[in-house]
Image (cartoon, grey):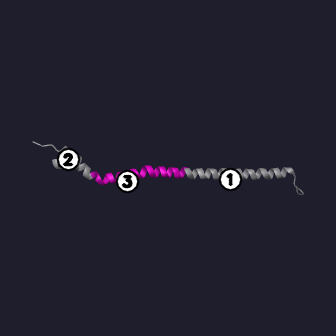
Amino acid sequence: MGEGEDEGSVCVCVCVCVCVYVYIYIYIYIYIYIYIYIYIYIYIYIYTYIPLIFDYVSDFLNLRRKYRRHHCPHKRCLPLHSRVPFP
């Protein structure tokens, strides 16, 4: 050992270095897992809601035609399989 150093100061220095290393490791670990959870949430959101939105848009575009075909009492507006001869 050098002059003016004792075993206690070396031990404290090692303990401080280890504590700083552990603190940085835990901080990085938590930081990475937070971002992983955020990305997982975003992917789940995209893969569940985007298809529903596109399905709704396509249904909205066909809504008028579907309504006229299925709810109109006129013979010309009924679907083909529902046409029956009227007296």
Q: What's the magenta region?
A: 37-63
Q: Please, what is the three-letter code of the amino acid marked with disc 1?
A: Ile
* Callout 2: SS: helix
- The percent coordinates of residue 53 (x first, y second) are 39, 52
Residue on which the image places disc 3: 54
Identity of the residue drawn at 35% across and 54% down? 57
Q: Classify mark 1: residues with Cα within 10 Å, few (<14), some (14-19) or many (20+).
A: few
Picture disc at residue 24: 1
Tell me, yes or no, whether the highlighted magenta stretch contains residue 30: no
Q: Classify mark 3: residues with Cα within 10 Å, few (<14), some (14-19) or many (20+).
A: few
- Distance from Cα at disc 3 to Cα at disc 1: 44 Å
Mark 3 vs 2: CB contact within 8 A: no
Q: Please, what is the three-letter code of the amino acid marked with disc 3?
A: Phe
Q: Is residue 41 left or right of residue 25?
A: left
Residue on which the image places disc 2: 80
- Distance from Cα at disc 3 to Cα at disc 2: 28 Å
Q: Is residue 87 left or right of residue 9?
A: left
Q: Is residue 58 left or right of residue 3?
A: left
Work out which quarter of the rendered image holds the C terminus and state it: top left
